[in-house]
Amino acid sequence: MSETITGLHPNVDSTAGVEHLSMQQALNRALDELLAENARTIIFGEDCGRLGGVFRITDGLQAKYGEDRVFDTPLAESGILGMSVGLAMAGFHPIPEVQFDGFAYPAINQIICQIARMNYRSRGTLPMPITLRVPSFGGIRAPEHHGESLEALFAHVPGLKVVSPATPHDAYHLLKYAATRPDPVIFMEPKSRYWQKGPVDVTTATPGEAIHDGGTSGGSSLTGARVAREGKHLTLVAWGAMVSRCLQVAELAAEDGIDVEVLDLRWLKPIDAEALARSVGKTRRAVVVHEAPLTSGLGAEVAQLITQSCFATLKAPVERVTGFDVPYPSGDLEDEYIPNIDRILFGIQRVLEYRRG
């Protein structure tokens, strides 16, 4: 990708093949390469063309690849996703964008009844290689409907895969991997982390193979979870923007002698049950952290998977620290809603102090 795509000049270690990019830059680079690698890849959405998207994820791509391959759509999410179905049926690889997560609701019928089911309904003759990019979660103090946490809704739907990167490195590699799958993937981008910078290994890797992921585990498959921080007393399980917050909590807990492991789930459908079992099997305690409401949130599924594999060795019930059972609030109330450091630390304390009756 030329530097003119983003207008920024990241530091590059050409020997190691590592560039220091923001998540926005990493996603932009991945899209640029996907367009270059496959002439049937098409990117579209509200303001995705000339403007380059609200968050500038598609910045410069229309100028480089033309209006036939990167273009703006009307303000009609059901139309955007309906068009994606037709394009996929015609052999294209659509990468549509829903401008904000809350705008996905009008397209739920197309996502559930068409995109998720077409491959099954056609007995494999009509695969749906659609990667739906959804700027997700809160943390930017946006108005109502501009911050949501919809992972449980999408993960519940058979036929969909759901993934959420937490680092620029994972954003780059997971997007490239998702866009080459024959199945529809909901790609949930933590919008509050778009400006987070980090090392991105841009060396070519076969999709799905083990690559260095920046975690302490030294490397992992793109299809699994990632150990973001190793520990021995307790496992914090998170995804998206909450991974960074859990890493902050782990550093604070370490000051009190509590060694916390942080597991970045990454894939929310399918969930890496083996990674959960390995991590919690070692620490014997777990706290799941997410922004969505508590009731029927994805944390309940994660807790069940942990209990199923680690029941005999768990020292305490799995704790959940989540958003509240209210509609996701507008920006002025986000700090009260999103799990903060203190709430997560209290969750850790409850698990560590649990005593069987």
Image (cartoon, helix red, strand yellow):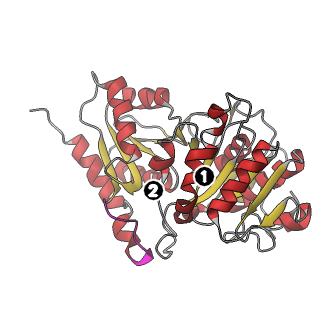
Foreground residue among 13 and 262: 262
Q: Closer to the camera: disc 1 or disc 2?
A: 1
Q: Tell me the residue that label 1 is attached to.
A: 110
Q: Tell me the residue that label 2 is attached to.
A: 245
Name the kind of residue labelled 2 in the image.
Arg
Foreground residue among 213 and 27: 27
Image quadrant containing the C terminus = top left
Q: Is residue 158 above or below residue 77?
A: above
- Residue found at the far left of this picture: 357
Q: Residue at x 70, y 69 (%)?
A: 46
Task: Look at the image and say whether residue 225 sits in the magenta stretch.
Answer: no
Q: Residue at x 70, y 29 (%)?
A: 124
Image quadrant containing the N terminus = bottom right
Q: CA distance from mark 1 to mark 2?
A: 34 Å
Q: Is residue 5 above or below residue 209?
A: below
Q: Residue at x 71, y 69 (%)?
A: 53
Q: Mark yes or no: residue 161 visible.
A: yes
Q: Residue at x 49, y 70 (%)?
A: 145
- Residue found at the far top of this picture: 312
Give, as a single range, the part of the protein colored magenta.
Answer: 325-332
Q: Mark yes or no: residue 163 visible.
A: no
Q: Is residue 256 above or below residue 137?
A: above
Foreground residue among 137 and 354: 137
Image position, residue 255 (x, y; %): 35, 51
Image position, residue 299 (x, y; %): 38, 44
